[in-house]
Amino acid sequence: MEKLLEFRHITKVFPGVTALDDINIDLYPGEVHIIVGENGAGKSTLMKILSGAYEATSGELYMEGKLIAKNSPQVSASLGISMIYQELNLVPELSIASNIFLGHELRRGGFVNKAAQEKRANELLKEIGVYVNAGTLVKQLGVGTQQMVEIAKALSRQAKVIVFDEPTSSLTDSEITELFHIIRLLKERNVGMFYISHRLEELFQIGDRVSVLRDGKHILTDTIDHMTMDDVIEGIAGRKIENLFPHVRKPAGDPMLEIRHLTGSKFSDVSMTVRAGEIVGVSGLVGAGRTETARAAFGIDKYESGEVVVCGRKLPKRSPSRANRLGMCLLPEDRKTEGLALELSIRENIVVSSLKALNPRGIVRAKNEATEVGKSINSLEIATSSMEKLVRFLSGGTQQKVVIAKWLLSNSRVFIFDEPTRGIDVGAKSSIYQLMDELVAGGAAILMISSDMTEILGMSDRIYVMSGGKLVGELDSEGATQNEILKLAFSNV
Amino acid sequence: MSKEKRFPAALARIPEATWIFLIVFIIASVLVPNFFSIGNLSTMLLQACTLTLLSVAMALTLMMGSIDLSMGGVVSMSGVIMAYMMNAGLSAWIALPAGLLLGLVFGLFNGVLVTKLKIPPFIATFGSMGIAQSIANTISEERTVTWVASEKTSLISFLGSKALVVEAGEGASNTLTISNLLIITVIAVAIVWFLFSRTTLGSNIYALGANQETARLSGINVTRWRIIVFMISGLLAALGGIVVMVRSNSVQPTIGANMEFQACVAAVLGGNIMTGGRGSVPGAVLGALTLYTIRSAMSLLGIDTSWVQVAIGVVLVIGMIINNYVTQRESQRAAVISRSAGKGGAEA
């Protein structure tokens, strides 16, 4: 079969860094070619060269055997190359149809022919099995449906190559199933697809071939049947990760966090206990009320009845600062907007919850701060050249460590992690897991909300499953299976 | 099922300002004697013309994620220059188009500052507001500019004249008066609304306001469209200058001062947000009418004009509360829609 697309000897040098070093990757029609690698491995740089956002320093890009001499977003679009980014690029106030035809509107006598646009958009949506009226405003759609609109938009431009950049990171399980269904439809239509993901289990569900990038180098490309999960992990990390989940079960101590009959608008009668030295996983579908329960327990949101006890003391409602003084902390799923101040330095982020203790009587003791932050950076192995580096420039894994350091410094003993490794590559994941294990080994208690099944099964001592706002089960992780958890997760939808 | 789906879509398209306008209007009609009379309403509409034009312009720039603070300055400047030209004996047929052209050029200037020189719109147009206002002050020597009515200025008298007078009863309060100025305003707003909804102008403005990168990747010429919107804004401001000039038959150099802030209030009441990407043209019109309902009601009650600002402030806050409520309801409905969408063919 003729190659649809080919990167030949692509090198991209930024001042001081070689982001891509002699990459040779190709794509056949009807193929899903998965590209994996750690953050900074060069995946997005490669895709930006494809989209025309970047120009390669050397090397060539061929589309259907023809050299693309000078690429640009316009050129790549006209050749039928479409990008579907993680942050969806739709205009919320416009209808689905207007979004699909944005920039290449169907016209009649100089005016936009809205009726024709809606008709064609409805056809496109139907082709991929989405049954929403194309006149609906995009702001009224959920993330999953918006992504399907993006796909319809790509189809409207006769896309031959579609690049998916972490498409499943914000989708629910059923939305992911729908997406995979559509991807299979696209395969039948001979669309070639590059698919970037951190979720390694997806490789085997949807991929035909896999390419691994590491530090800008092309490590390997092979068909999926010739690979195992371990091969992929080893390729990504550059070393064998013997044991991704280091957690060893130890006898649990006294209860550190007790949530009793907590009831709020999105959850009802939820009771959970976490003991010292325990990691307790909370599984469930997106929307099962897990995050909402955690936020209410920590005091961010209100709840109607029930109580939360931390280390034997009852928490007042709606007071995160009081919860924190009693040693509880919450590490939100969205680190960038809720857990960190991206424009501040590592030091400033770490000390922000301990300002009072470090700076008695409100006078800044810069030395105190520097010593303590230096200690955290060493003990958590935060990879940085300086504690004054802005958090914005750190990778996802390092950012997560900064959040942990912040709470450790303020003497937290009860940790609620909400999706602790979302968007974090596998190498950094293992060090986060290690850190979590060290925390509980030191007597802390962890409640871990996660949608990553392997993480739940690999890290937890016990597993709570929520469904439709209710706690529907508690499992011992020893012997628990994915099927068992899923059955519970769907039991009250 | 399909009924349930369409209802929120229709609801989402009613400008948020509808509710606050209705509330204010009904309260004024019930509580203020003589407010709900065709005579008073005619006067109110005529008074609201300039602000309506500016609010629409402001809405366009806000929706695009920019702001145009220079419009009050442009009203003063174009007004003064047009009056000065007629004062110097030029025909209104030359002065008025020159004033409009000046508005366009000033919009172009703003657009170039923002797009080519990459100055944030707030700063750029704040600066050009100062420039425009200073030009108005300098040319007029800070005095009111008048002209001698003659054959050459007959266009002014025509614009100021009444297109339609219907006497429904005794006295001024029962007389419906439609001025040519009102007709011109309605036509101008209608043209903008038509361009907005029937050409790519609207989609492009929303796209620019939501995310410029999205717009660029969709093949929209971001620079050109931003300049175009600033030019439309300048043009509407100059038209506002003409309305003011015709109504008062003279131009005070400070006539436009602070109008940009009132326009901002009206546009925000109309559902536009400062960060762009949402809002509407009819919303801005309703916002402007809300402000003039308050003014008219309070002046009929004989309340000191300094209290008008207080009332407008209160209404702005209440309006925002209502807008937030409406938006929240919308997003709750959105969740329902996307859930039913995922389930596929059954209800399609």
Image: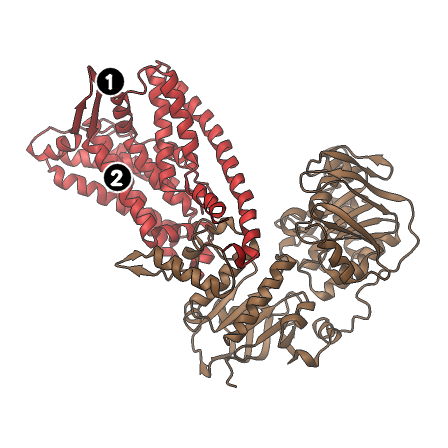
> Who is closer to the viewer here, A201 or A403?
A201
Label 2: which secondary element:
helix
> Taking A176 as reference, is B261 above or below it?
above
Tag 1 or tag 2, which sits nearer the N-term? 1
Question: Which residue is at a point 69% across and 51% down the rendered structure image?
Answer: A346
- For disc 1, the marked residue is B173
User: Which numbered circle lies on residue A198?
Assistant: none
- Give the amino acid at mark 2: Ala
- For disc 2, the marked residue is B238
10 Å crowding of disc 1: few (<14), some (14-19), many (20+): some
> Taking A126 as reference, is A316 above or below it?
above
**Residue A415 in sight:** yes
Q: Is residue A130 found left or right of A114 in the rendered image?
A: right
| Spot occupied by residue A412 in the image (x, y as percentages of width and height) | 80, 44
The letter of the brown chain is A
Point out the frontmost of discs 2 and 1: 1
- Give the amino acid at mark 1: Ser
The picture quadrant where one finds residue A401 is bottom right
Q: Is residue A39 found left or right of A136 in the rendered image?
A: right
Which chain's residue wears label 2? Answer: B
Question: Which residue is at a point 66% across and 78% down the rendered structure image?
Answer: A224
> Taking A255 as reference, is B166 above or below it?
above
10 Å crowding of disc 2: few (<14), some (14-19), many (20+): many
The letter of the red chain is B
